[in-house]
Amino acid sequence: MRALKNPLIAALVVLIVASALGLLTNSYIQLIVLFLFVNSIMGMSLNLVNGYTGQFSLGHAGFVAVGAYFTAVMTTKFPVPDGLAGLPYFILISLGSGLLAGAFGYIVGLPSLRLKGDYLAIVTLGFGEIIRVSLNNAPYLGGALGISSIPSMPEVDLGGFVVSNYITSLLFAIFWSVVCFFVIWRLLKSSHGRCFLSVREDEIAAEAMGINTTKAKIQAFVVSSFFAGIAGALYAHFTNYVSPASFTFLMSIDAVIMVVLGGMGSMSGVLTSALIITVLPEILRSLKDYTGGVDLRMIIYSLALILIMILRPKGLFGDKEINLNWRKNVGSST
Amino acid sequence: MEELLQHLINGLSLGSIYALIALGYTMVYGILQMINFAHSEVYMMGAFFAYYTAKYLNLSSSPGFGSLAIVLVVTMVLCSLLGLAIEKFAYRPLRKAPKLNVLITAIGVSLFLQYFAQLVFGADPKVFPTLIEEQTLFTIAGAPIKSFDVTILVVSLVSMGVLHFLVYHTKLGKAMRAVSHNASVASILGINVSRVIAYTFIIGSSLAGIGAILVGIKYQKIEPMMGTMIGLKAFVAAVLGGIGSIAGAVTGGLILGISEILVVVYGSSQYRDALAFLILIFILLVKPAGMFGKNRIEKV
């Protein structure tokens, strides 16, 4: 068990268990496992803005959409460049999705992050909707129909041993989840991250200490949108299909619930609630017959939001992490 | 010319509906400094209350001002109760909590009511019963004036008049203004702040109920998701006029309604919903306090 405290070994164990679970069961479970990672990236990235920087964004789905559409367009409308086949190509495309989403985050963040609290929530909600409506009205991007037949991850032939595309997808998702986790984790330990936290705790005091609060907020927002774009790229590869209807306000709410439920400012909290958010709709799916097709999930989510705010305002985990030893390990690695 | 007049009247009636709903946002904001996201859902529930009232009393068989008055009163009472319940169960426990928590709760209440309504009333749109017969009452410079638009204008003018009287000429109104100015000093001077807040929710919610009936009369289609867009636009109207200001909410609503109709007529209907957001972003960047709002200096 002691070895499990090493993050790398723990990640490997999780990987083996997850792939064993996925391999042994059907493709439905496999897709849920993949989506667990997409949701984790979405939750972790939003946590940087909503949890650590204390700015309330309600437009995360917009950035996921930007990333997903970039991947969709690049993989379906342009040929694969020579000598760039396989995984490097996919990583490059997803990197591009992230960068484009990050650029959008900068454009959106620059005017809107001057606002506070409620106003910021409304403006980000508005931007999310504007992105969705523009996608709906862009014929090149397929309009309301969206873009289909986006390629999945390729199979890899390792000298006779063929790695199935589920495994490569899983590896790809794990790769980006780990990158996202460590970038945000290390960022928070840096002076930039301390600026984010101070903005959350008291903006006026932070400004009095000489912190450029607008700059700190925009930095957090851009990094967050970058990873939202990555989540979008993964989404596009895993579902093979993107349409504006996938990136509604409800997706932003999903991300917000992950942050609020897990604890604003706790990575392990967000990961735990990502698990809940991914699995819960699948469990509730069977109840749809009794409710006349109405999604019970949203009723549960909304009640959860209200009750958590009243009973446990800091979320399930608050700003604590699950494994303090792990934290020490990461902390001493520099 | 006739067309322009027609569009202006259309815009005016749409704008007065926005104004009625914006008043609810602005009054709650003035007193609690929070955006009541659930307000748009109170409006939506109001439409369904009116629908079922008219259905069970079989009022659509005898349209006229009598039926309209009955539906108005019942809906206003039910909406006030709903607003009161939201205030008591969701917002009151968080009176001293950070703003972000209140905001998240408000979003939670809004989502809950939306999906609860889908569960109870069904997700498909319903046809609103005829409370006022559609007919042309008279013409001004060749433009026909419809009974719908006259009803909407009269009802909203009367409600705004009553509101004005309530806020500026009664003891309750004085207490409300005092609480919005400084709640702690008001409570030292013997004003029951909780009661004033409850009354604010009652007034705001009944105005939302009136707005819902007027929308039902004009557009004849109601559904559980109808609150989202109109709520956002009413909120924009409130911000445009200066949130917290009653005159501002009315002016903002009228400006938004008229400009929206003009954009639909002379531009494209696709930009209809984008317009509100553009106005919002523009106002927040240029003059965040709105037209009638005062800049508050942030003190530590």
Image (cartoon, coloured by chain):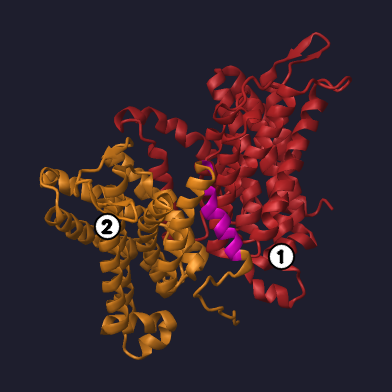
Chain colours: A red, B orange
What's the magenta region?
A: B270-284
* Position of B131 relative to A24 (above/below): below
Q: Quadrant of residue B173?
A: bottom left
Q: Is residue B283 shown in magenta?
A: yes
Residue at 57 percent across and 40 percent down: it is A132
Q: Is residue B300 shown in magenta?
A: no
Residue B179 in sight from this viewpoint: yes
Q: Which mark is residue A214?
A: 1
Instruction: Report which residue position mark 2 lands on.
Output: B150
* Position of A15 relative to B151 (above/below): above
Determine the secondary structure under disc 2.
helix
Residue at 59 percent across and 79 percent down: it is B298
Coordinates of residue A203 in the picture (x, y in percent)? 65, 71
Residue A265 in sight from this viewpoint: no
Residue at 26 percent across and 49 percent down: it is B217
Chain letter of the residue beneath label 1 in the structure image: A
Q: Quadrant of residue A20?
A: top right
Q: Tell me which secondary structure the magenta stretch mostly adopts.
A: helix
